[in-house]
Image (cartoon, rainbow, N blue to C red):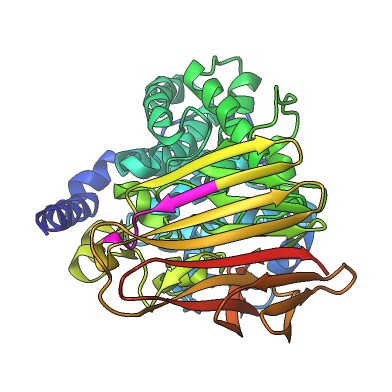
Amino acid sequence: MFAAAGAALARQARREWLGSPPHRMTLKGVASHGLAAEPRDLRPADPQVGAAALAGDFTYAGQTLSLGKGGHPWDQASPNRRFAVALHRFEWLPHLLTQGEAGAAEALRLVLEWRRLFGRWNDFSWDAEVMERRLFNLACAIGDLSRAAGSEEAERLRSDLARQAQALAAQAETWRDAERLTACALVYAALAGQPAEQKLQPTLDRLASALEAAVAADGGHASRSPEGAMELLIDLRVLDETLASRGWPAPQALLNAIDRLTGAVRFFVLADGRLPALQGGGDSTPGRVAAALAHARPPDAPAARRGGFERLESRRLQVFADAAAPAAGPWSLTACAQPAAVEILADGALLIGGAGWSPDAVAPQAVRLAPAASTATLGEDSCGAPLGGFAGRALGPRLAGAPAEVRAARQEAEGAVWLELSHDGWARAFGLRHERRLYLDLAADDLRGEDRFTPIDRPLGRYQPFAARFHLDPGVTAEVEAERVVRLSRPGLPDWLLRSDAAEVLVEPAIRYQNAVAQRTTQVLLRGQVPPEGGARLRWRLEAG
């Protein structure tokens, strides 16, 4: 509570300072004589999204705002906050620039209209969460925008860009320093002239320190999000290429982070070309993943564990298991309390996953909890939950009460891989430890699992229901075919059977977020009960049907 009160007071003081006339006077643009470099975003832009924006149609999180040609969204009410954030991040900008001269002219018009209404500091559009991506998108578009504008207007655009970079640098927070300082450095690297160069080196020095905290030795992002690792990798590669184009040496810490992140992202790539939607990472696209790894040198040797995740593979099955505790403190703002969760691909397509929650999804915070993942749960509780109320408003939706100790042990033999996971997420409430054992038979292409609840220091004292959950991809259907046997089917691919010794087998509705939009799907629940004396076991098997 003291930490929340202190954070609330500090945040209020910072907001008052940022909105004060003295602070606004310090936000002066950096005069430049043009551009020293034109950053190039490596993420693939979508011409269809650009054509829609050119026609005045903006779509985010399943909602569309139709303004007609020549309209602008800045004086319109957005359907939801996620939509407004996307607009003010200028997520439409790279797509609009795929439309040639007409797209560049429209992009310039929208940017100028935004500046007219929001060009001075305000609590929403100048918040670091929004500014970070807007600055990156603007830095990568500044060349096209400058050519579409007159020389005087182009200079104002560059000056405004530097002014926003100065404001963002002042708002950097520990858990997002690397991303935000990368955007600031990109701005200063793009601008020509001594004033920008004087700001570039100190920003790179700060970035080097931030990367040491954000990127682990094995390349995992401190948030433990696979998508977070990929997005930071792309940003750093864009910055590195921009620095190289103007002959500015990149800090060794930046190059080291790129190497480590590249290894981690390569490890995360699934058979369908995307990344696991775990620990706050939403559904990624194969094109975006391929762009992150383009021109990366070949790996020295395949890894079995990175970023707290384990990877098991046979010819037809691919299993990713969450094998570490969720991120803690400020890094846990996007973490999920879903220990020992798995994603399983069969024949190159996702078969079993989870809800795929990410911060961009218009979804309740409850989707970050264990019942929304393919793991085992006790009763209706979850092992950890995001902060709410005053603490949540002051500190953000950090994860509290999540497992502090997650153990993983892996053994490999000819023709088989054995993984043992355990965590203490249920210890405080029930005095039980969850143990999940996975055995992948490489020759038979089947996965055998066992979920145990083991007493730690006291008997349970009463019956407690538990369930092993298997969330299916929206393209997969489930049918209870016989006692304790569920057939999983996807059109065009072979069926798979989920067998178990569960006391009860159910198929229930579920959701999975794809492109931040909820899609209906189903989940298989294998139910049982832990007896009063404690100790229960559930065995299950996934095999070709």
The single residue placed furthest to the front in the displayed view is: 533
Judge whether residue 179 is colored magenta. Answer: no
In the image, is 172 to the left or to the right of 282? left
**x 87%, y 68%: residue:** 494
- On screen, residue 77 above or below 358: below
Residue 256: where, in percent of width, then height? 53, 21
**Stretch of the chain drawn in magenta:** 420-427
Q: Is residue 153 visible?
A: no
**x 73%, y 69%: residue:** 52
Q: Quadrant of the C terminus?
A: bottom right
- On screen, residue 41 above or below 537: above
Residue 50: where, in percent of width, then height? 73, 61
Residue 223: where, in percent of width, then height? 43, 46
Q: Quadrant of residue 499?
A: bottom right
Q: Quadrant of residue 397?
A: bottom left
Residue 264: where, in percent of width, then height? 59, 36
- On screen, residue 50 above or below 71: above
Q: Nearer the viewer, residue 327 or 87?
A: 327
Q: Nearer the viewer, residue 104 or 382?
A: 382
**x 63%, y 55%: residue:** 93
The single residue placed furthest to the left in the displayed view is: 2
The single residue placed furthest to the right in the displayed view is: 492
Give the mark count.
Answer: 0
In the image, is 354 to the left or to the right of 114? right
Q: Nearer the viewer, residue 388 or 16?
A: 388
In the image, is 186 to the left or to the right of 507? left
Q: Is residue 524 visible?
A: yes
Q: Nearer the viewer, residue 303 or 274?
A: 303
**x 53%, y 68%: residue:** 538
Q: Quadrant of the N terminus?
A: bottom left
